[in-house]
Image: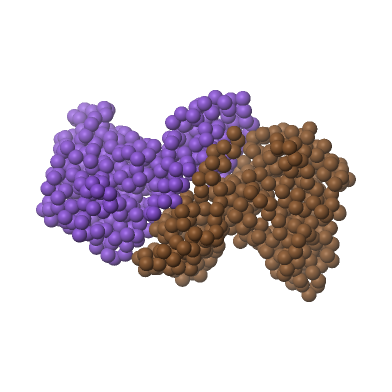
Chain colours: A brown, B purple
Amino acid sequence: MDDVLGGITAALGFTSAALHCGIKAKTGALDLAVIAAERPVAAAGLFTTNLAKAAPVLVSREHLDRAAGHARAVVVNSGCANACTGDAGLQDARNMARAVADALGCGEHEVLVASTGVIGVALPMQKVVPGIRNAVQRLGRDAAADTARAIMTTDPFPKEHAVTVTTPGGDFTVGGIAKGSGMIEPHMATMLGFLTTDADVPPALLRRALTESARDTFNAITVDGECSTNDSLFAMASGASGVKIDDRSYAALLDGLRAVSRHLAIGIVRGGEGATKLIAITVEDASSPDDARRVARTIANSPLVKTAVHGADPNWGRIVASAGRSGVTFDVDRTTVRVGGVLLFENGLPHDDASPRAAEHMKGAEIRIDVNVGTGGGGAATIWTCDLSAEYVRINGEYRT
Amino acid sequence: MDDVLGGITAALGFTSAALHCGIKAKTGALDLAVIAAERPVAAAGLFTTNLAKAAPVLVSREHLDRAAGHARAVVVNSGCANACTGDAGLQDARNMARAVADALGCGEHEVLVASTGVIGVALPMQKVVPGIRNAVQRLGRDAAADTARAIMTTDPFPKEHAVTVTTPGGDFTVGGIAKGSGMIEPHMATMLGFLTTDADVPPALLRRALTESARDTFNAITVDGECSTNDSLFAMASGASGVKIDDRSYAALLDGLRAVSRHLAIGIVRGGEGATKLIAITVEDASSPDDARRVARTIANSPLVKTAVHGADPNWGRIVASAGRSGVTFDVDRTTVRVGGVLLFENGLPHDDASPRAAEHMKGAEIRIDVNVGTGGGGAATIWTCDLSAEYVRINGEYRT
């Protein structure tokens, strides 16, 4: 597998466009994008489990059902989440799809919709609809970087990635873009992510691969433990490479999706609101992978662990205390804690002499925390998160003002 | 019921002492206290549900069992949690009890032990044991305020309260002290709390009243969602008022315990690390009180809600989004959100014109958030929390350094 350039349009058969239509107040700030296939192609989506699902989530889920796992295009805006906007919001999301469908000459239910931004504000449809018409006219293969930018809100940098996967049946490409960067603890999907591939994949297999690849990538990250109203992850497969995916070549597709998804997911954490450090928390030897994930997630969402990492303090006590309240059963006396590979806690006792070496590791930008809970069950999982800084407080105390 | 002075020794039959024995580095900083009854009295304890239970928690639980719900005294230190300290830590906790028992002339298992402070550090027993002997010699009824101070760590102010309850059988008094102020989301008990009463209560009834009164007081607060290794809440009943508590007068005891506990618990939230505002989150009309508690707790622990409150931003979207990810089932379109009594969200739609009035309320020091989830079930609960400030990050990034 090789990294390639081209982001969301690296895979053959896809075009994109991005522009400023006026949802964001700042002149020229990209706030609208369309990603299109040459014809209706296999498509899959994963959506937020939040009860408060935004209008575009409801509409996209319905469209995927009605089109039996196919789509021609995705339209996405930033600056307004179109969430908690009632029936008028639902109609706005449908009208976004219709505007794309009219311009492309396809069915409304072949268009998926995504929105991100402030909750509870109506979309300025008098700007969005002309913007969509403009975007469809500009669709091309040179707008990938702008498309990655157009979906950003508080993200400090765009997230895009693409790989080419070599199989006995030929090469195919997987590309994608994603955005964060607050309200991030995806359950079943992430904030917004879009993946394209030119492999030829039946819809059911694409859905299975998307679900499986999300488990250890988009669903293994957390910035602040907040699952949003708009989380959506889409994949579209054009088939333009001529490489057919079946049960035998499924693993190659999964590898490609996972590689791009992991890169984008970790990018979301690196760009988490106020983040200065990436933290990888691995829990091993739990009774099951689910137990390992739960312990890792509790540590990852602990404000005391996150602030300790921010202060480069190898405070293993907070790690043990958060693992201990995770609801998972294990024996603290059989638990080991390592920070940056340095053993800090074992047999119920600290190794305080090792603390300065762990503190040295924590001054870096990438922090490793490894916890072995010693159940003999062998369950393991990694969760990625970031530190908690005063900047997170500043961003979120002032977001709407 | 009337508020009275006297804190932990307001109830007849109790004495206390507090001093600096040298656990805390700062000269003169109070770090050790003893609370004693004139004879072994009815006692009850609630302890952390964290798997990583500190040595004093294990020892106190064992002593309460062995003494069949009786105790003569509690010894408590601050500055060192005696948690994750292995067998040596257990021995230290036992030796603290023994030192009190020797000085008072009672059995070791009639002494309860509590510690709070840094995890994973051994107690300086060569300072603690002489300190305990000194403290027992100084026991009196004039040290309540110092006793409340001696259990503080990062708490910005001491928490003490006492009430006198009038019953047909006569008056009795309930007093107490508590400390926070980080790693606060008690499950079954709070960080450290001590209650005394001069009512005459059988141990089983005292335990029942303590459990019941904690549910809507100490167990209804959260600062940062972190359940600590040392959470302990103790109650002792001397009987010195001569007022007997039985099934008929149980409600009066519960009222008294609840009044003191609520005052102390809210004090812990007000004094939460970096807190500038007290937030009372009430959820009504859930399917059950447990569901209501779960929704309220999810909102209370949402960093986005806590930072919005910090910035006086009536961001009801974050409130709806956190309620929606709580795992509790309800219909968002039947949900109402009020901030400071001002209706901000109803029928799936915002009332943005009301936003300035809600913002005005949020500039104050006490914030009310009311969420009605409209299930028709009538389940209600209130959780108290505080805002999340940059100061929380500073305190916890630098706690050990």
- Give coordinates of residue B45: x percent, y percent: 28, 48
The answer to whether B43 appears left or right of B382 in the picture is: left
Residue placed most toward the observer, B46 or A105:
A105
Q: How many marks?
A: 0
Residue B285, visible in the rendered structure: no
In the figure, is residue A399 to the left or right of B293?
A: right
In the depicted view, which residue is nearer to us: B75 or A127?
A: A127
Q: Residue furthest bottom?
A: A168
Name the residue: 77% across, 53% down: A144
Near-viewer residue (A158 or B344): A158
Residue A383, x across and y down, in percent: 55, 59
Image vertical order of residue A250 relative to residue B219, above or below: below
Q: Residue at x 48, y 56 (%)?
A: A309
Query: What is the x, y in percent for residue B122?
Result: 29, 60
At 76% from the left edge and 66% from the top edge, which residue is drawn? A164
Observer-nearest of B54 and A357: A357
- Quarter that holds the C terminus of chain A: top right
- In the rendered image of this protein, does residue B137 appear above or below residue B277? below
- Work out which quarter of the rendered image holds the N terminus of chain A and state it: bottom right
Corner quadrant of residue B167 = top left
Image coordinates of residue B116 in percent, x first then y, are: 31, 51
* Residue farthest toward the right in the current orientation of the protein: A105
Q: Is residue B387 visible?
A: yes
Residue drawn at x 57%, y 42% as measured from the top left: A395
